[in-house]
Amino acid sequence: MHLIKRRYLLVQIAGSGIVDERAFMDAVWNAVLKLFGEYGASQTNLILMRHKLKPNYAILRCSHKALDIVKASLASVTQMNGKPVALRVLGVSGTLKGLRRQLPETRL
Amino acid sequence: MRKFVDLHLCALIDDLEHVERMVDLSARLGYRIVGIPLPPNVSQEVIRQIEKICNNARVEFAKRLDLMPRTSNELLNDLGRLRRKFEIVSVACISKSVARQAAKDRRVDLLSPCLTFPCKRFFDYAEAELASKKSAAFEIDMASILSSTGFPRIRLLSSLRKEIAIARKFDMPVTISSGASDENFLRSPQDYAALASLFDLPVSYALQALSDNPLSIVERNKGKLSPCYIAPGMRVVEK
């Protein structure tokens, strides 16, 4: 059986007020599309796993092969809903449990 | 463990609260040394205050000078006058003569390409060969990539891709700096390494450009500015 490898990313949304789920994902997808196009975006298998764990934190899941694409795209986001914002990847793991172990202080 | 260095943290030195916020954020993102550009006539009081802020954040401070000379003579005058006052000297290469002079002068640490006008980028094989024989490194400000969009960003990435390939061919060190004047343009070293893949810089090479390469410049220059330094290869070991 072919095992699909995935990566979970804990992302901090800094610099703006509380951001809703839709605005966040729109900004992420726009960044992926701008930098890597539709072909690159199709390889990411990007999904929002959890939003608002704590205010302005989110967990994304992506294909492990597209991790660099997703990290570069997240780093390139500077605006959300016209307001300045910065997305910072705080941790990456192969499992949600691993992400929790890496960053216990964020209380996933 | 790598010691990450941001040689171009563009904090507003007139606003010490802004400096404090930027330095604190840099420390939280994992940087251990920050280079803050200062004007040539900066007072010792301002330097002491910035040093105090950096000490509180447990970050080392490197005094940086950004030169933007119009002619090579102006560059030579500025270097003679100011080199010993700063740990990092960067030269914005806005003309070919300045770019060539900066590349062959060992007092220059960083060569910064002109970001605003793509036609004024002078980094080519000849320049890389000159710089590789001296100590200058090629500096990339990531804020320029983050702040541009659309066609200007495409052009910038294309230029950077060519310049990086040339620098690597001649074993010229590359440094990646934030160039951030705002907290929203500051990213962690790992995020910058991921962004560097946009101009075909492998992650391992990008991490080196964020840690070892800038660190060696800072250490070399701090050694040269110490009172024990006499000349290249000569230093006081015991008085």
Image (cartoon, coloured by chain):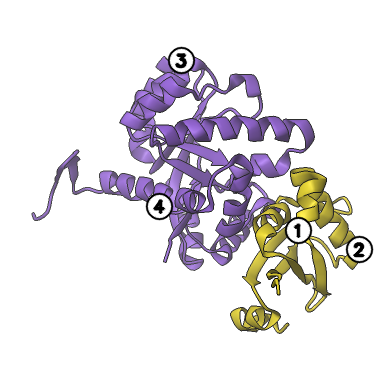
Chain colours: A yellow, B purple
Q: Where, quadrant-wise, is the N terminus of chain B in this rendering?
A: bottom left
Check contact, mark 3 vs mark 4: CB within 8 A. Answer: no
Mark 3–mark 4 distance (CA, rounded to whole Å): 30 Å
Q: Which of the numbered marks, if any, corresponds to residue A44?
A: 1
Q: Secondary structure at mark 1?
A: helix
Is residue B64 visible to us here?
Answer: yes
- Circle 2 is placed at which residue position? A22
**Foreground label between 1 and 4:** 1
Q: Which image quarter: residue B28?
A: bottom right
What's the distance in space between the residues labelled 2 and 4, CA to CA?
A: 40 Å
**Badge 1 sits on which subunit?**
A
Q: Position of residue A71 (x, y in %)?
A: 67, 57
In depth, the one of B94 and A67 nearer the eye is A67
Residue under label 4: B212
Q: What is the C-alpha distance between the residues marked 2 and 1?
A: 18 Å
- In the image, are marks 3 and 4 on the same chain? yes
Q: Residues within 10 Å of mark 3 (few under 14, many from 20)?
A: some
Mark closest to the chain's N terminus, 2 or 1: 2
Q: Position of residue B214 (x, y in %)?
A: 42, 48
Q: Chain of mark 4?
A: B
Residue at 64 percent across and 68 percent down: it is A90
Q: Residue B211, image x and y in percent?
A: 44, 54
Have a look at marks 2 and 4 and say if they share a chain: no
| Residue at 37% from the left image edge and 21% from the top image edge | B76
Amino acid type, mark 3: Ser
Instruction: Return the chain for callout 2.
Output: A
- Label placed on residue B97: 3
The x and y percentages for residue B106 are: 32, 30
Mark 4, residues whose alpha carbon is within 10 Å: few (<14), some, or many (≥20)?
Answer: some
Q: Amino acid at mark 1?
A: Thr
User: CA–CA distance between discs 3 and 1?
Assistant: 46 Å
Chain letter for mark 3: B
